[in-house]
Image: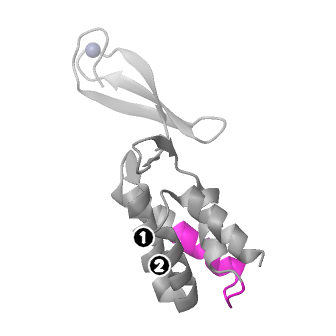
Amino acid sequence: MKCLKCDSSDDKVIDSRSSKDGHGIKRRRECLDCGHRYSTYEEVMNNEIKVVKKDGTRDDFKREKLRDGINKACWKRPISLDDIDKITNKLIKSIEDDFDGEISTSEIGNRVMRALKELDEVAYVRFASVYRQFKDIEEFIEEIKTLGLK
Ligand SMILES: [Zn+2]
């Protein structure tokens, strides 16, 4: 942080407090060169990840969509909703850790397949055989829906 008065970048934080909603921190700082006091506000960034589809278009990365795909693959399998939530959370965390900004639908698909493979063979095969043939995860979800209704 540079002091507005003297342009020095030496400052010390003299007070920090959370914002009312808890998503930000307000810091009171003092310039070590000229003594000028000022405040800064830091906000938690919402790292929105975009999904790049095979046709090059982008869509928001949605937890629900991912969960839905996994849920459909696990249809009638001995897998609890709790397990599905756990895999979903794990996948999202790994995606957020490894990707900053964009991820392709095929990369998401590969990760889901890997996760399902460890969990349940039938769910894995179901996901893999269906997912690979479709342009994106939405088409896949639609297909799984029709399978589920038989
Ligand atoms: Zn200063």
**Residue 111 circle label:** 1
User: Of the residues shown, which amino acid type is indicated by label 1?
Assistant: Arg
Which one is in front, 21 or 86? 86
Q: Looking at the rendering, which quadrant does residue 111 occupy?
A: bottom left
In this image, 12 relative to 70: left or right? Answer: left
Residue 75 belongs to the span the image colors magenta: no
Residue under the image location 54 percent in, 37 percent down = 24
Q: SS at mark 2?
A: helix
Which range of residues does the magenta coloring cover?
76-90
CA neighbours of label 1 inside 10 A, class few (<14), some (14 to 19), many (20+): some
Q: Is residue 73 visible?
A: yes
Where is residue 106? Give x, y as percent. 40, 61
Which one is in front, 62 or 138? 138
Q: Is residue 15 above or below residue 124?
A: above
Residue under the image location 52 percent in, 90 percent down = 121
Q: Is residue 83 above or below residue 138?
A: below
Q: Main secondary structure of the magenta part?
A: helix
How is the structure coloured here?
one colour
Q: SS at mark 1?
A: helix
Marks 2 and 1, Cα distance to the nearest angstrom?
6 Å
User: Which residue corresponds to mark 2?
Assistant: 115
Where is residue 73? Give x, y as percent. 61, 77
Q: Mark 2–mark 1 contact, CB under 8 Å?
A: yes
In this image, 60 relative to 11: left or right? Answer: right
Residue 77 belongs to the span the image colors magenta: yes
Residue under the image location 42 percent in, 18 percent down = 38
